[in-house]
Image (cartoon, rainbow, N blue to C red):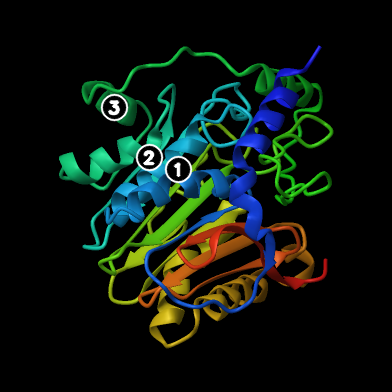
Amino acid sequence: MIHRRTFLSKTALVGLAPIFQHAFSKNTSNKATLPVVLSTWDAGVRANEAAWKILSSGGHALDAVEAGVKVTELEQNCCVGLGANPDREGKVTLDASIMDHLGNCGAVAALERIQHPISVARRVMEKTPHTFLVGQGAQQFAISEGFPLMPDQLSPAAQKAYQEWLKKSEYKPIINIENQQQTPYLPAPSHLPDGTWNHDTIGMIAIDQNGNLSGSCTTSGMGFKMRGRVGDSPVIGAGLYVDNQVGAATATGQGEDIIRICGSFLVVEFMRQGLHPTEACKKAIERLIQLKGKEQACKIQACFIAIDKKGNYGGYSLQKGFTFAVYQANGGNRLVKSSHILPC
Ligand code: ASP
């Protein structure tokens, strides 16, 4: 009998084969051509496909970054949407943010039972006088906007992981790395051997044919977090930042620490000072290490990706194991192994 996950992996692998003809590349410098879309982790490859359909036909970056991460929010074999690990009370709570080229932004946090938090974040941006809705208020708004309320239940994999977690009830966030033991071309392996998720976020940034930038970030947050915990992903300036004069950046990793350095804003500010996106991401990680000290820094992972106004892009992580996906006309859709700072 073929296991459902194996079946999904195999079918996705066959379907995606042409995407990977450009293979797994190194984090080398890049030639700027527009449009460009960039997203975090292996799952970004599949998300980039949806974003590219919009960008390559002259569409807006904002539509592309919303459509792109919606793919990941729906993936049951991934780690971002309603199929993800719950908080320690057994509830999946989702966070998301979106920002456009005009500096408009919207975000939701601790949103339950709604499949596409990124689209709710966009509605917050476009239809309310606010930028951030949380918890029940965010859910109420989503329902009033016509988003269906999904069943209050965990995916089978998350249910299993939660039952396992309850045995010890210890909060030990796992360093989030992409598990590349099998092949980097498989859909993101979603579980570590003990049944826990590997990481929980997709951040996407894009520049369209008109040179306009936008970004999105969506997550289930850290598995088994305290009820009410919110990480960096929906916090504008931490998990995501866009300045259309300069560039865009997004983050993944230990949200508490990314918030401490206003990570994505910091990356954009470094680009404003003239740094290449790769260098800007590296300097933000260095700031984090400076803040925490090397020993503590080695207990976490933090990663940034960035694009500047010309379409140059890059990424950097604190420690080994971060990947990001890039799609542009002259390179196709590729997975890049990020450079990292600490040999932990
Ligand atoms: N940054 C996310 C959070 O802290 C987690 C992740 O990127 O995996 O909620």
Estimate the spatial distance between the alpha carbons at disc 1 and disc 3, rounded to whole Å.
Answer: 18 Å
Task: Indicate which label's residue lies in the foreground, 3 or 2.
Answer: 2
Disc 3 vs disc 2: Cβ atoms closer than 8 Å? Answer: no
Say which quarter of the image contains residue 206: bottom left
Which residue is label 3 attached to?
142
Q: Quadrant of the C terminus?
A: bottom right
Of mark 3 and mark 2, the one earlier in the sequence is 2
Q: Check disc 1 and report the residue beneath it.
A: 69
Task: Say what amino acid the circle numbered 1 marks.
Answer: Val
Quarter of the image with the N terminus in it: top right
Report the amino acid beneath label 2: Ile
136 and 118: which is toward the camera: 118
Amino acid found under the numbered disc labelled 3: Ala
Q: Furthest-bottom residue in view? A: 274
Mark 2 or mark 1, whichever is nearer to me: 1
> Answer yes or no: do the residues labelled 2 and 1 have beta carbons within 8 Å?
yes
Residue annotated with mark 2: 118
Q: CA distance from mark 3 to mark 2?
A: 11 Å
Q: Secondary structure at mark 1?
A: helix
